């Protein structure tokens, strides 16, 4: 239980969620049409406050991954604008997005060790492995894998690979962590475990997280705000606030309050899917 | 209990990696013993057949006669072997460098690929024996002609395999590199090339064997007119003189060389991939 008290103390340092401060990133009427003519995302607007934990929830084809990729700068929107009010801009006027991205697959380089994989973001910035050593170990310690620095990805279980992927996203100390259904391929036990770990890290370090998922239960457990999205064309359907206080633990997962939120969210999701079929 | 303590050795064991030790019994011994016994058996029957049947050595020499010839003609065969080996390995080296370099160039742009790839295919599908006479005319020495022939044969497997490998890069990893602002050179060096390594090594193993074959075939094409004194030349010479034991001895040298090249290229491949690639890692269930 001591971990709970530690993180409860840390949570007070965190800026108030979705606070009055200017947002970290805001999307204005973002639309994206793919080259085959599919309208993947239509008129999406969203303000993401610093320190928030937001989930994008919806069935496949609702544009949630597309939205995440556009925020990450992988692919330009067809119309609309993204602003990074707090970010510094580089010489070409592009915002320096300090982001970490976790894909649905661990997306590790099989030929590199765990440490080598975690080093990658720094290596691309020209930091030698020796200079990055401490940061690599710190990131691995965060996800509980410091003993596996020299292992190769194929020697790890699915959950451990995902932890490596998270460590890699954390090594640059990003302000914004983008996660694209990161735990969807894992078994339930491992997923719950990683959910808890992620929440604990978030409370401790106070980044902003945008988490894409198709699981009602996962989104309610994790987030302060859920953006329910509808398909064909992908769009924001409804926005829900999950008011339950942090830290959230297994007690929350089995509480009536959690059940109520899940029912509410599930109803919204069904309405979104019905709207998509209409 | 409702602990949310995240890190700790307890759950590191819970999703422990499949690092089980390789428990192998007599598997390794069998792999050596069975082929060896088989080889000895074949040689024994061969020896028995030629001695008991009084087969003349100019029809089918006995293994002992071939060994004798190998020993006696060693001063002739060894320099010939060295000439063939020199051509084979120079050609293989050129094929590896040229094939990999052109593959890297091809994947840089669709235009380059469209412009160059058809010629690589044409060079590949045209029988080497058919171009050899032309090459012999155009080049200053026979050795260079042989080298070009062997190179042309070994080049294509390296090129097509490496190209395929460079194109098979994981899209998510490419996105990741883009996300972290990797340059073209960084992406090539840190992502595309390591990813293409297993493909390149498959090309190496094919090209290794083909280079030897091509070196011999090209020497045949150069014929007795050629100033070449490689193993193929000695083979032809032995045939004209009906020195069949020496012909067999040269053949033995060629196959041993071929097997050795295959063994070495497989070993290189295994050494480079054993840590991470499925092809080189023992499957455990």
Image (tube, coloured by chain):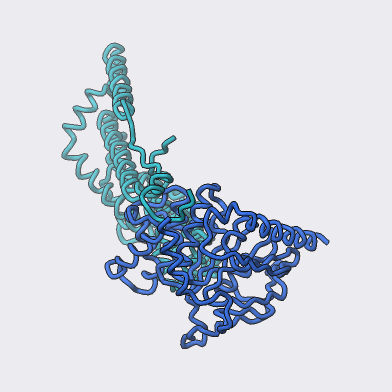
Q: Position of residue A29 (x, y in %)?
A: 69, 79
Q: Please tell me which residue is depicted at 75% across the width and 58% down the height of the picture.
A: A270
Let me know if residue B122 appears in the view: no
Most extreme residue toward the right is A278
Question: Residue A208 vs residue B14: left or right?
Answer: right
- The image quarter containing residue B35 is top left
The colour applied to the residues of chain A in this rendering is: blue
Is A236 on the left-hand or right-hand side of B107? right
Identity of the residue drawn at 20% across and 41% down:
B78
Q: Quadrant of the C terminus of chain B?
A: top left
Which picture quadrant has residue B19?
top left
- Residue A269 is situated, as x and y percent measured from the top left of the image, at 72, 60
Q: Is residue B270 above or below residue A60?
A: above
Question: Percent from the top left, x then y, of residue B151?
Answer: 37, 55
Q: Is residue B198 above or below residue A94?
A: above
Along the horizontal axis of the image, is A250 left or right of B12? right
Farthest residue toward the top?
B52
* Frontmost residue, A225 versus A260: A260
Residue at (26, 30) in percent of width and height: B243
Question: Horizontal placement of A216 versus B216: left or right?
Answer: right
Q: How many marks?
A: 0
Residue B29 appears in the rendering: yes
Q: Nearer the viewer, residue A124 or B197?
A: A124
Chain cyan in the figure, letter: B
Front residue of B140/A244: it is: A244
């Amino acid at each position: 239980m001591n971990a709970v008290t530690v993180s409860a103390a840390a949570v007070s340092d965190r800026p108030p969620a979705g606070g009055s401060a200017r947002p970290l990133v805001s999307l204005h009427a973002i639309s994206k049409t793919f080259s085959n003519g599919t309208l993947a995302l239509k008129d999406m607007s969203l303000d993401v406050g610093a320190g928030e934990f937001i989930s994008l929830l919806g069935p496949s084809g609702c544009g949630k991954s597309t939205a995440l990729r556009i925020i990450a700068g992988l692919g330009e929107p067809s119309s609309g604008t993204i602003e990074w009010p707090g970010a510094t801009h580089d010489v070409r006027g592009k915002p320096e997005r300090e982001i970490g991205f976790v894909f649905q697959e661990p997306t590790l380089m099989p030929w590199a060790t765990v440490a080598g994989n975690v080093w990658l973001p720094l290596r691309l910035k020209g930091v030698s492995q020796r200079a990055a050593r401490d940061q690599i170990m710190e990131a691995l310690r965060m996800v509980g894998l410091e003993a596996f620095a020299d292992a190769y990805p194929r020697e790890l279980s699915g959950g451990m690979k995902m932890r490596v992927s998270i460590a890699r996203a954390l090594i640059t100390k990003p302000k914004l962590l983008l996660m694209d259904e990161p735990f969807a391929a894992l078994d339930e036990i491992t997923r719950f475990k990683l959910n808890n770990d992620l929440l604990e890290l978030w409370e401790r370090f106070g980044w902003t997280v945008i988490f894409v998922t198709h699981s009602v239960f996962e989104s309610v457990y994790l987030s302060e705000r859920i953006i329910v999205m509808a398909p064909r064309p992908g769009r924001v359907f409804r926005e829900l606030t999950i008011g339950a206080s942090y830290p959230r633990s297994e007690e929350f997962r089995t509480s009536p309050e959690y059940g109520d939120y899940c029912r509410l969210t599930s109803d919204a999701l069904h309405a979104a899917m019905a709207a998509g079929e209409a | 209990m409702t602990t949310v303590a995240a890190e700790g050795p307890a759950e590191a064991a819970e999703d422990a990696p499949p690092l089980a030790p390789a428990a192998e019994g007599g598997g390794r011994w069998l792999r050596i013993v069975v082929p060896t016994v088989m080889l000895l058996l074949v040689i024994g029957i061969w020896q028995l057949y030629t001695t008991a049947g009084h087969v003349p050595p100019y029809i089918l020499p006995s293994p002992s006669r071939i060994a004798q010839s190998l020993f006696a003609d060693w001063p002739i065969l060894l320099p010939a072997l060295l000439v063939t080996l020199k051509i084979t390995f120079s050609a293989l080296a050129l094929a590896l460098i040229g094939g990999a370099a052109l593959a890297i160039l091809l994947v840089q742009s669709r235009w380059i690929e469209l412009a160059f790839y058809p010629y690589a295919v044409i060079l590949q599908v045209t029988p080497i024996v058919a171009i050899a006479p032309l090459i012999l005319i155009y080049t200053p020495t026979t050795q260079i002609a042989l080298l070009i022939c062997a190179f042309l044969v070994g080049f294509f497997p390296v090129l097509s395999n490496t190209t395929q490998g460079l194109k098979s890069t994981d899209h998510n990893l490419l996105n990741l590199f883009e996300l972290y602002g990797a340059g073209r050179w960084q992406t090539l060096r840190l992502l595309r090339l390591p990813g293409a390594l297993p493909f390149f090594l498959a090309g190496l193993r094919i090209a290794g064997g083909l280079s030897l074959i091509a070196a011999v075939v090209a020497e045949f094409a150069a014929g007795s007119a050629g100033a070449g004194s490689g193993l193929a030349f000695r083979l032809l010479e032995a045939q004209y003189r009906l020195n069949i034991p020496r012909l067999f001895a040269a053949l033995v040298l060629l196959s041993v060389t071929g097997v050795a090249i295959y063994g070495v290229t497989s070993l290189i491949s295994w050494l480079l991939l054993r840590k991470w690639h499925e092809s080189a890692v023992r499957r455990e269930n």
